[in-house]
Amino acid sequence: MGIWAGPGFDLYKEGQDRFVEKTAKIRQHANSLGLYLAHEIHPGTGAACADEFNMLVDICDGDACLAVNADPSHCWEGEDWETRFNKVSDRVYGCHVKNYTIHQGVPLRKMEPDWHHRAMQFTDLATGDLNLTRYVEVMMKIGYPQRYCEVMGTDSAPLIVEAESNYRDGDATSADGIAFVRDHLCFPVQEGSFEDAMGA
């Protein structure tokens, strides 16, 4: 439990002021170079959920360099990945592809040094709890590919495999992940709708 504010103190406001002050110089430099600082919304970072990231943007007066590197594998504590990335949709400039599973009956916050026994475990792309095809479709819906291509001057936007598994070797996980993206997540894009074809 956190006691954030009380008579004579407000740790939340102090933290906000500290973030603005400590990032001012790097944000100014990024903007001068036309760069984006892509934050991976993640437990233990400046923003652990979409609302916290949007708060950081707000306290920095909407600074355009503050961006998001999407990663759906860190949405396992109440905020699902679709809700998260819809909330920060116009700030997504990077895209990781990663999967995980939650083992039932094990507390998510249990202090367990052996990662084989933790509730949340990363997996190879094909066997985790996430539907990664739906994830890619949401990335398309929120404009990630167009945004990336415009900034980078490319014709396509990458789906970055972040290989991590609690059981499979890292090199094997990487090779499997690259093949999975190639075979399942790169597909011809629909250019119209059923209604268009029917003349509706």
Image (tube, rainbow, N blue to C red):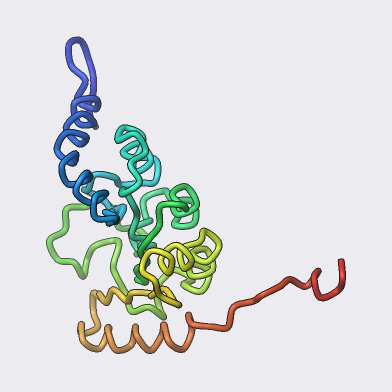
Residue beneath the point at 49% across and 70% down: 136
Q: Is residue 67 visible?
A: yes
In this view, 70 is above or below 198: above
Residue beneath the point at 71% across and 73% down: 192
Give the x, y percent position of residue 112: 16, 58
Q: Quadrant of the C terminus?
A: bottom right
Residue beneath the point at 28% across and 67% down: 121
In this view, 57 is above or below 200: above
User: In this orientation, which residue lies closer to the viewer: 10 or 151?
Assistant: 151
Left or right, 188 with respect to 97, comes to: right
Residue beneath the point at 39% across and 46% down: 50
Q: Residue extending furthest right? A: 199
Left or right, 58 with respect to 16, comes to: right
Tell me the quarter of the picture where residue 122 sits.
Answer: bottom left
In this view, 123 is above or below 89: below
Left or right, 189 with respect to 61, comes to: right
Q: Quadrant of the N terminus?
A: top left
Q: Residue extending furthest front? A: 32
Tell me the quarter of the picture where residue 16 sits.
Answer: top left
Q: Is residue 100 visible?
A: no
User: In this orientation, which residue lies closer to the viewer: 36 or 194?
Assistant: 36
Give the x, y percent position of residue 68: 34, 55
Give the x, y percent position of residue 193: 74, 71
